[in-house]
Amino acid sequence: MSACVPTRAADPNRTEHTHTPHSPPPTGPRRFRIAGADVSASIAVFLIALPLSLGIALATGAPLQAGLVAAAVGGLVAGRLGGSPLQVSGPAAGLTVVTADLIQRYGWRTTCAITVLAGLAQLGLGCLRVARGALAVSPAIVHGMLAGIGVTIAVAQLHIVLGGTPQSSVPDNLRALPAQLAQMHPAAVSVSVLTLALLLLWPRLPGRAGRVLRKVPAALVAVAGATAAAALAGLRLPKVDLPSWSNHALAGLPEGPVLGLVAAVLTTTLVCSVQSLLGAVAVDKLVAGRPGLSARVGRSRLDRELLGQGAANIVSGSLGGLPIAGVAVRSSANVHAGAVSRNSTMLHGVLVVIAALLMVPALELIPLASLAALVMAVGIQMVSLNHIRTVTRHREVWVYAVTTLGVVSLGVLEGVALGIAMAVGVALHRLTRTRITHEEREGAHHVHVRGQLTFLAVPRLSRVLHRVPHGVDAVVELDGSFMDHAAFETLQDWQKTHTAQGGTVEITGRHSGTRISEPQTFTSCRCRPWTPWLNHQCDRPPSTSPSGKSPEGTDHSEPDPTGTGGASGHELARGISAFQRNTAPLVRSELARLAREGQRPSQLFLTCADSRLVTSMITSSGPGDLFVVRNVGNLVPRPGEESGDDSVAAAIEYAVDVLRVRSITVCGHSGCGAMQALLNSEPGGARTPLKRWLRHGLPSLERMADKNLPWVRLAGRSPEDAVEQLCLTNVVQQLEHLRAHESVARALDEGALELHGMYFHVGEAEAYLLTGTDADGAFDRVREPDLTA
């Protein structure tokens, strides 16, 4: 996309400021500045990181100071060197089981040495540029691993919540649970219940006061509230014990069996790397949801992120800290708090250092039961119902279940290995298991192939195809994504034979919607079901004159069975027929779901009624995604100026208050006839309906003529003419009108809605998004994702 900037050369009274291209940068010392958004975001992340770091250290059995060391190093080292600027690294719940097992087997000093070696391994992987390869691991395995770790954490911490001591494995903890329930300590349970209650209820505080209070992290409120309650009640409980930093244990030489140490390093490297890389991809998705931020921050560079994580683990292990990985909770909080650069991550590390040095007396008031409840809640949240639904929908629930059970019962590395083996088995099963059915309906014989069509399925395919009688209409529907050469030749040979015997064959792909393997003798066009907008009909007869004669004088007219009258009626009927034949089978199940559940669009898309703007095409959206409002000139009348026409205001209110859309986009386009009419309009004359409607665009004309406002730019260039200049200015002006609507203003104040400006250049097939402020904006080209990182 390009950016919109109108030129002002036509105004002789306006001073032009020209800049020599490639001029040298300004001289002088460059001052280091931290954006206010980064400062506030770092505070929010720090308030979350502090109690979680202590809780994770407690869950692993490491010195509690090790959690603070890892949090500080993760912020400073990984934040500075990593390839994902807004990802926050530190001690992660996903590493708890691995670290606890290492401490039990080898002791704390050797665990720190293993962390250092894992960091070196990550540096090696980063230098080999294999970061993208980690993303090839099935998401079902990753989610299953995290769920297994979450179950392990929750079961272990439950013993501390009840006032006892956890065992070394999940089976042992489950066996000891009845005895622990019989001997639970009321004081520890009460503090834990209070912590969990605050964690659950704090994000759900109602009203305006609740919106203000919810800005304080629930984790901090839960731990602080439980600590205060325990102190006021005078409860005698085990509390955080931070020994003097002079006694802090650093890394030592690794001691133990070589093979065991190698397996420990590989396990730590795998879990740290996969969690960090997946976290970086997730952060990219969060950044993409904030307008203008993706251009400023850029996509994550995964190989650099691996190098940064490796350096952080080397430093953390050397200083006696826990292993480090990207942490989803802190990273999402960082993005949602408004961070704009890596300075927020680094500043949060500085705050952790300050807290570790100056807040020791306050931290030692925290009951261990409260931290255990906090970590137990984090472990429960790692078993995501949304992930289970997703893997079930993709028929990978067995991979998820095997990985989860393997991690719970055997360990992380063993569970992941079992998950990989299960994923390979499922893939082979899908490749070899193909269902081929034959049925006759509505006078045609249908052969339906479900699954991958390989040479292994050729005997069954040939047997079913030969059941189709000679000379009949046949439809072969391929419901799969792969067909090898042997299957293709079998299908092609049968098709030629059947056609030669007087029959017809239509071979379609259920997912692609395209007919394949058509005999080359067919000269008629084969349209794809999603491209009727190409103004191109499969069955269109030769163009005719109004009298029904072709240019050569041949009569190609035919009766109109639809009763719609004329060529346009035929086009309508043909289009509907093509939809019913080709497209309806592809979307029927999705539309049936939408009919059951109702519409839940994510955005309101307000654009011009111009026939060249196909909203679903330029936004790559489908049924149920967009709530579309179209009018002449993509205008949004200001409240109180509708003069009897409340259609746009009603649509806005319905979309925001009823449908709860998360964003509204105003989309203008090049060559807009409404903007041309506005420019050419003269005062006076008949007040036609079009003129009465276009009066809502007069503020855009006034804005364009205002010399005190900078002109909107288009991808760094000036608009081509006055019409394009007005088209761009109109988008900015209509966004201002949107903000004046009560429902929009309320949703914006609550942070539940975002506004976007968009410009579509019809001739270039380029879309541009508005960046910057309305007073000083520019339309920038939407860039392709960076797949080379």
Image: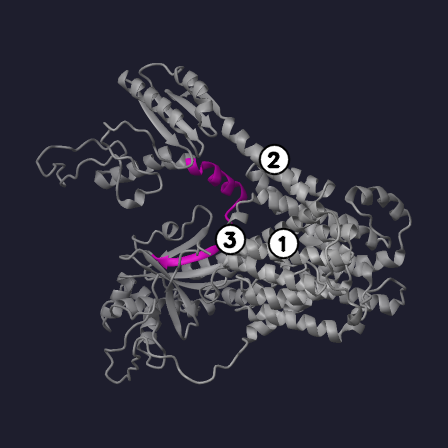
Where does label 1 land, which residue? Answer: 272
Q: Which kind of residue does numbered mark 2 sit on?
A: Met
Q: Is residue 540 above or below residue 661?
A: above
Residue 224 position in % (x across, y down): 77, 67
Can residue 89 be seen by looking at this rendering? no
Name the disc covering residue 422, or none.
2
Separation (CA) of disc 3 from disc 1 = 17 Å
Which region is colored magenta?
Answer: 586-608
Where does label 3 land, which residue? Answer: 128
Q: Is 210 left, or right, of 342 in this rendering?
A: right
Q: Which of the 4 image quadrants contains residue 670? A: bottom left
The residue under the point 30% across, 72% down is: 6
Mark closer to the chain start, 2 or 3: 3
Separation (CA) of disc 2 from disc 1 = 22 Å
Q: In terms of secondary structure, where does tag 2 sit?
A: helix
The residue under the point 30% across, 82% down is: 17
Q: Is 234 left, or right, of 13 in this rendering?
A: right
Q: Nearer the viewer, residue 88 or 209?
A: 88
Q: Nearer the viewer, residue 182 or 635?
A: 182
Name the disc covering residue 168, or none.
none
Q: Which kind of residue does numbered mark 3 sit on?
A: Leu
